[in-house]
Amino acid sequence: MDGGHSWTLRHVTCGVDAEFVDVASAPGGALWAMCAGQPSAGNQFKSVERSTDGGRTWTDTGTSCPGFGSCSGSNSGYLGELDAVSATNAFYVGDRSSLTGTDDGGRTWRVDVAVGGDGGGTSRVIFFDASHGVVLGQDDNNNEATTIWSTSDGGTHWGSVVPRGAGL
């Protein structure tokens, strides 16, 4: 609003006893917050909140269970970072986590087992627009080689490349 000259404290109301919180801003202004509890044995309790009013109020998406296990099928992994593509579409990555995404505002999440894996996991995700994005991680299907995946169709299909010297 004023180029960052003034700031206002906002509180995220996590659905879990959070040790980690990652916040992402979508084009159009929607805010997403993913909260994660204590990591343990490849799992981590997570919850997701969204705000459409600059963080003044937060809405629980209904996703609050271990690794989203009983909620959506992802039963392992840790929170690394979150990227919000829109008010309804977001992705997260993390150690021991494949790329995981939602297109229904966070009510359900799908694991993309072709991007990353629960061995080494994924470490970075960024979408440049609704269609084009990249993920950095370790490919379980290629001896956990450091890999860059890219999409040009919003994450429906992914291509990959292993950078030279990635094993160093």
Image (cartoon, rainbow, N blue to C red):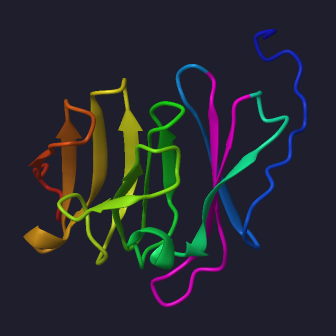
Residue 131 position (above or below residue 38): above
Q: Residue at x 55, y 87 (%)?
A: 40
Residue 89 position (above or below residue 147): above
Does the magenta portion include 115? no
Relative to 150, 135 lies left or right: right
Residue 60 position (above or below residue 43): above
Report the magenta residues as a range. Answer: 29-52
Give the percent coordinates (x, y) of residue 33. 65, 49
Q: Residue at x 20, y 37 (%)?
A: 151
Q: Residue at x 17, y 60 (%)?
A: 114
Q: Please state which of residues 111 and 125 is positioned toward the viewer in this rendering.
A: 111
Q: Residue at x 57, y 19 (%)?
A: 28
Relative to 155, 96 lies left or right: right
Which picture quadrant has residue 89?
Answer: top left
Check the image and name the residue furthest to the top: 2
Which picture quadrant has residue 66?
Answer: bottom right
Image quarter hosting the C terminus = bottom left
Q: Please state which of residues 85 and 136 is positioned toward the viewer in this rendering.
A: 85
